[in-house]
Image (tube, rainbow, N blue to C red):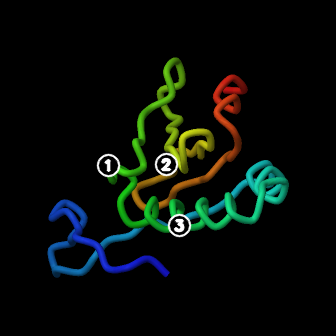
């Protein structure tokens, strides 16, 4: 579990409740996730939890993938990246995870 964090007001609904994204994973993500070291898997789980709460949190270093307007990437560590896209207003589809070279696939 991640320790409590400060949330940006933009993530709060009009009722004051935290708005979070639902996360879904592709088979490609799950396949590549299983290939990683247990320590990397732990880091990824923490980052996906953070992604669900605030996709633009500074520690994710999230940005659009150049040349692919609908795809985004974020950093797990200096080498591992997660690639995702938004489907609707509250769903994030996580496409892939892997070492930095996964960006060459998109």
Instruction: Report the front residue among 43 and 62.
Output: 43
Instruction: Report the front residue among 87 and 84.
Output: 84
The reply to whether callout 1 and callout 2 are in contact (CB within 8 Å) is: no
| Circle 2 crowding by C-alpha within 10 Å: few under 14, some 14–19, many from 20 | some
Residue that protrudes farthest toward the top in the picture = 67
- Can you tell which mark lies on residue 58? 1
Real-space Cα separation, disc 3 to disc 2, in angstroms: 19 Å
Residue 6, quarter of picture:
bottom left
Residue beneath the point at 51% across and 51% down: 87
- Please state the horizontal and vertical placement of residue 16, each as a whole percent of the image: 16, 80
Q: Secondary structure at mark 3?
A: helix
- Can you tell which mark lies on residue 46? 3
Residue 10, quarter of picture:
bottom left
- Please state the horizontal and vertical placement of residue 89, each as a whole percent of the image: 40, 56
Q: Quadrant of the C terminus?
A: top right
First in sequence: mark 1 vs mark 3: 3
- Please state the horizontal and vertical placement of residue 22, each as a whole percent of the image: 51, 67
Residue beneath the point at 42% across and 49% down: 60
Tell me: 18 left or right of 87.
left
The reply to whether callout 1 and callout 3 are in contact (CB within 8 Å) is: no
Q: Which residue is mark 2?
A: 86
């Amino acid at each position: 579990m991640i320790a409590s964090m400060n949330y940006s007001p933009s993530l709060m609904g009009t009722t004051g409740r935290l708005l979070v994204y639902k996360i879904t994973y592709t088979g490609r993500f799950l396949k590549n996730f299983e290939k990683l070291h247990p320590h990397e898997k732990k880091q990824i789980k923490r980052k996906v939890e953070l992604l669900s709460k605030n996709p633009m949190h500074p520690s994710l270093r999230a940005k659009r993938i150049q040349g692919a307007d609908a795809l985004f990437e974020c950093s797990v560590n200096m080498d591992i990246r997660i690639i995702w896209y938004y489907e609707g207003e509250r769903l994030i589809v996580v496409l892939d995870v892997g070492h930095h070279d996964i960006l060459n696939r998109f």
